[in-house]
Image (cartoon, helix red, strand yellow):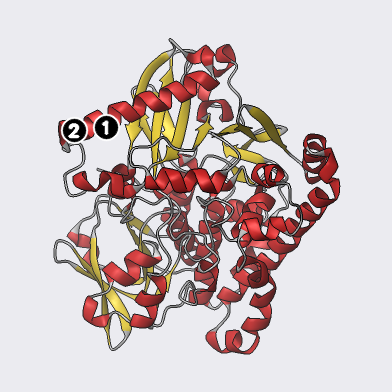
Amino acid sequence: MKNLYTSELTKNKYDSIIIGSGVGGLTTAVCLAKSGKKVLVLEKHYAIGGFSHTFKRKKFEWDVGAHYIGQVNNPNSLIRKAFDYITNSKLQWEDMGDIYDQAIIEGETYNFKKGLQNQINQMIAYFPNDENAIREYYALVNKVSGHASVFFSEKSMPNWLSKLVGHQLRKNFLKYSKQTTHKVLSSLTKNEKLISVLCAQCGNYGLTPKQSSFGVHALVVAHYIEGAAYPVGGAANIHKSMEDVIAKHGGMIAIKADVKHIIIKDNTAIGVLMQNGDILYAKNIISNAGAHNTFNKLILPKLQKPENTIALNKVMPSVSHVCIYVGLNASDEELNLPKYNIWLYENYKFDETRELHLKTKNSISPVFYISFPSAKDSEWPKKHPGTAAIQVLGSYPFNWMQEWEHMRWQKRGADYEAVKEDLKNVFLEKLYKTLPQIKGKVEICELSTPLSTKHFSNYDKGEIYGLEHTPERFELKQLRPKTNYKNLYLTGQDIIAVGVCSAMFAGIITSINILNRNVLWRIARYKT
């Protein structure tokens, strides 16, 4: 198997060992390797890329997390330049069109259109009596997302400089991130229906308006406001392109490389102990395994620091989910399937419905997300002619699966399979109701549960977005690349926020801390 871990790797010397091959870990590896550093990425499973990887069944394939990306249609945007830098411009993008998201709430349809002014006009058309509130809302989203850039950039500063000016750089974003989304929007309008529509993309960060930080809401809305795109050839091309760059610069990635714990001596990270007993040493150890996993599991209990664990454990893991992966024996064109995503809500009371769902075991998810990877990818008809692929995601609390938690993958018994079959039928019916033209065209349908997510991503509660994006999350001082262990660094989405782009920028910020160089300046000047 290509890249399979072998004990021969213990014979090499490394500048940095990176635990986890998600986008954050791979981005860090690229930035370090391009600076002449010897890097080794260790991936527990056989699939590289974290939530950017894809999987195949027969003649179909689906992405598992990278469903759409914002700001890459503009070749001069920093996000696009960052992708070009970490992939050597090998990653190409397919524009999703004038509509990137559609929300259907109680049967009423709302389109999210590409372009700030187009989106403002569209919302005013839906809610003509709330024009002032709508304009104030989008102005505030842009303002807060601008503050976010400064807030997260501060994490790249040396500790001494952060102590001098950090508070000043953080305060403007924290003013809003400390408030819930609903609280901020309620200060602009009392129209609860409008608030729900403006929050219809909240599934992108996994919390409803009264629970989520307005900081993350503003980040997500601003990220997509100028439209969205999809990687040509599929989401896996994100990590494949980075793998090539890492290899070109002498770095290595090893799969089925299970790290038992980080070796810390005299408060300094010096290496990792593998599950098979191997020890690998490096000048720097970088964890892309998530903050909870890093501080609670990868560090021995006797070496853990209460200032880390107590603070972090107050913020819960994010939402877990069920997903069906549907393969159709007709093309997107034949079935008239859209490129945009669809958000389905039972009603406008997002918070109340979510609370009832969490309290009622085996209740139906109050929100469903439908994505069309084949429709988004211009290369799909060449690779998979006469077919189409769809995914449907919905909420499913991890504790509803706990009785099977310690059983082996694909060996969890008849009861587990029966629950999966029931869920599959519920999700399929929801899909048929939304897109009746696909009925009779389904060739394959496979369902994943929070236990599947835990198995492949190693997140303890099957969460997909790392830590919950509550107001408290953004105040955690521990969510920085530099930890209070010398030469131990964090990277990945917990450092910034949910999503592929946040994980990528976490990798960039982590590399700035390690290299003590302005990698962002290098990226901004990068030419294709």
The answer to whether residue 492 is left or right of residue 209 is left
The residue labelled by disc 2 is 415
Asked if residue 418 is positioned above or below residue 113 in the image, the reply reads above
Q: Quadrant of residue 254?
A: bottom left
Is residue 49 something one can see in this rendering? no
* Towards the viewer: 222 or 175: 175
Q: Which residue is mark 1?
A: 419
Mark pair 2, 1: CA separation? 6 Å
SS class, disc 1: helix
Query: Within 10 Å of the Cα at label 1, are there few (<14), some (14-19), or many (20+) other Cα atoms?
Result: few
Name the kind of residue labelled 1 in the image: Val
Query: Mark 2 is on which residue type?
Result: Asp
Q: Residue at x 23, y 58 (%)?
A: 258
Percent across and percent down for residue 266 are: 28, 89
Do residues under tags 2 and 1 come within 8 Å of each other at their CB atoms?
yes
> Visible in this render: residue 220?
yes
Pinpoint residue 413: horizontal percent, then vertical percent.
15, 34
Label 2 secondary element: helix
Identity of the residue drawn at 22% across and 81% down: 302
